[in-house]
Image (spheres, coloured by chain):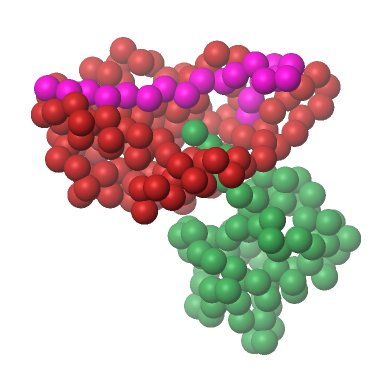
Chain colours: A red, B green
Amino acid sequence: MIRVLVSPAPIDLADEMALAGQDGALATFTGMVRADDGVTELMLEHYPGATERALTVLAEEAVLRWSLSGVTIVHRVGPMRLGDRIVFVAASGAHRAEALDACAFLIDRLKTDAPFWKRERVGDHHRWVEPRASDDVSAEKWR
Amino acid sequence: MRILYFAWVRERIGAAEEEVEPPAEVDTVAALIGWLAARSDRHAAALSEPERLRAARDKDFVPLHTPIAGAREIAIFPPVTGG
């Protein structure tokens, strides 16, 4: 089962965990808004239509590569506060190794393959987050 | 052809999308970026460094050398930073 959701609504972990896995192993990753250098707010922009397509392609690739019973990718968009959950990914399967690898694959590749852009607010002005070279390295190891 | 802009590309141009009809010699995404950059100072400010830009053709990520013939929608944006 694949669940892909892009929404401005807060991510409810209990709901998502319950939907994500009834199997032997459930691996999850949750990304949250960090207080980097005085950041007080984060805005997530995305490319409607293309985003959902890219996330679905990723989820389908995970299902082909590992023996999984479920893949979940939930990404929040719009304005967020410090500590808010930005992204939740989960992979469930019979055994931990496959669930853990698939979970790492999903978040590593989401960082480079899905059309999201972060804009940070610091005081009275905002700035667009620059991509990290280390994200490309992390994504590349799954290719 | 519909052109979409995102993130700082959108902000610098001052528009999220526009309809254009590039001439036939504008045959790739890279050529399209060069052609769009000449439309105004704001376009030039957003599009003058193609190495900082990425693109999608009909909602699929593509390299900048990709042909645009037959495309309905081209999106131009900075490298992605989600997750």
Asked whether A3 or A109 is in front, the reply is: A109
Question: Residue farthest to the right?
Answer: B41
Magenta stretch: give its range. A24-43
Asked which quadrant contains residue A128, the reply is top right
Q: At which x and y percent is residue B43?
A: 80, 60
Asked which quadrant contains residue B45, the reply is bottom right
At 39% from the left edge and 47% from the top edge, which residue is drawn?
A141
Q: Looking at the picture, does residue B69 appear above or below residue A57?
A: below
Q: At which x and y percent is residue A138?
A: 45, 42
The question of residue A116 being in magenta is answered with no
At 23% from the left edge and 17% from the top edge, which residue is drawn?
A18
Question: Which quadrant does the N terminus of chain A fall into?
Answer: top left
Identify the main secondary structure in magenta: strand
Q: Looking at the picture, does residue B2 appear above or below residue A123?
A: below
| Residue A70 visible within the image | no
At 20% from the left edge and 35% from the top edge, which residue is drawn?
A98
| Residue B65 visible within the image | yes
Asked whether B78 or B20 is in front, the reply is: B78
Q: At which x and y percent is residue A16?
A: 31, 21
Question: Residue farthest to the bottom?
Answer: B25
Q: At which x and y percent is residue B33?
A: 70, 68
Q: Is residue B47 left or right of residue B1?
A: right
Q: Is residue B49 left or right of residue A12?
A: right
